[in-house]
Image (cartoon, rainbow, N blue to C red):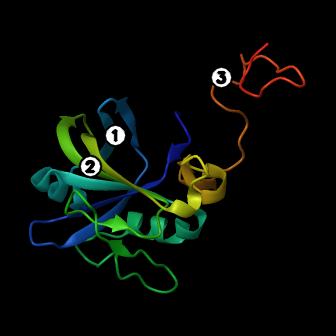
Amino acid sequence: MLYPLPAVLVTCADNEGNANVMTAAWAGTVCSDPVMVSVSIRKERYSHGIIAKTGEFCLCLTTEQMAKATDFVGVRSGRDIDKFNLPGDMKLTRGQAAKVKAPIIEESPVCLECRVKEIIELGSHDMFIGEVLATNVDEKYLDENGGFRLEKSGLITYSHGRYFSLGKMLGKFGYSVRKNRKKGKNKDEKR
């Protein structure tokens, strides 16, 4: 019941350069120094074997515009189709990562290039702990200070088999304890 979860696309490429992409919701940040993430993948998934063998993957955030493709690549196997050549109006463009052989997805606002540090066998899923080697951010989602503008990106989440959009900011870290500023004082001074 720990929902919602980020709906992410996980990319990988085998040693011959054949790429795959899958949808995952069991993903998250696990460490800030060094920056590390996790993704849990069922052993029978096509991507599981590729990532276990190559030790590399990318986590790509998904948006409202990518929702249909995100769902599609989650219900079809890369053993059967090329997921970078989707039918109809769905599109996932394979991009070149800077540090790993796994591709990034051009339509994604954020892609994290990861090297596997550990695989933890858990039961139905194995958890891949990956150190983030590079972060690719679409600059149109950055503010003037280089901060990520979540509300402009249209990110989606997953909850009990359904996708939901995100976007409304409710506050900023520490806003619940921040003191009101006096009128006429420097904006950086506190009461």
Amino acid type assigned to the residue bearing label 2 in the image: Cys
The answer to which of 78 and 54 lies nearer the viewer is: 54
Residue placed furthest toward the top: 191
On the image, the x and y values in percent for residue 31 come to: 35, 30
Amino acid type assigned to the residue bearing label 3 in the image: Gly
On the image, the x and y values in percent for residue 56 come to: 20, 53
* Alpha carbon separation for disc pair 1 and 3: 24 Å
Q: Which residue is drawn at the image coordinates 25% and 34% (left, top)? A: 122
Image side of residue 177 versus residue 88, left or right? right
Residue 166 visible within the image = no
Q: Earlier in the sequence, mark 2 or mark 3?
A: 2
Amino acid type assigned to the residue bearing label 1 in the image: Val
10 Å neighbourhood of mark 3: few (<14), some, or many (≥20)? Answer: few
Q: Which residue is drawn at the image coordinates 18% and 38% (left, top)? A: 117
Q: Which residue is drawn at the image coordinates 52% and 33% (left, top)? A: 2
Q: Secondary structure at mark 1?
A: strand
* Alpha carbon separation for disc pair 1 and 2: 8 Å
Residue 37 image label? 1
Q: Which residue is drawn at the image coordinates 33% and 71% (left, top)? A: 95
Q: Which residue is mark 3?
A: 174
Residue 93 visible within the image = yes
The answer to which of 129 and 79 lies nearer the viewer is: 129
Task: Answer whether labels 1 and 3 touch (C-beta < 8 Å).
Answer: no
Task: Answer whether labels 1 and 2 touch (C-beta < 8 Å).
Answer: yes
On the image, the x and y values in percent for residue 50 come to: 16, 59
- Toward which corner of the image does residue 191 lie, by quadrant? top right
Image side of residue 116 versus residue 134, left or right? left
Q: Which residue is mark 2?
A: 114
Residue placed furthest toward the right: 183
Say if 145 sits above or below 73 in the image. above
10 Å neighbourhood of mark 2: few (<14), some, or many (≥20)? Answer: many
Disc number lying in front (1 or 3): 3
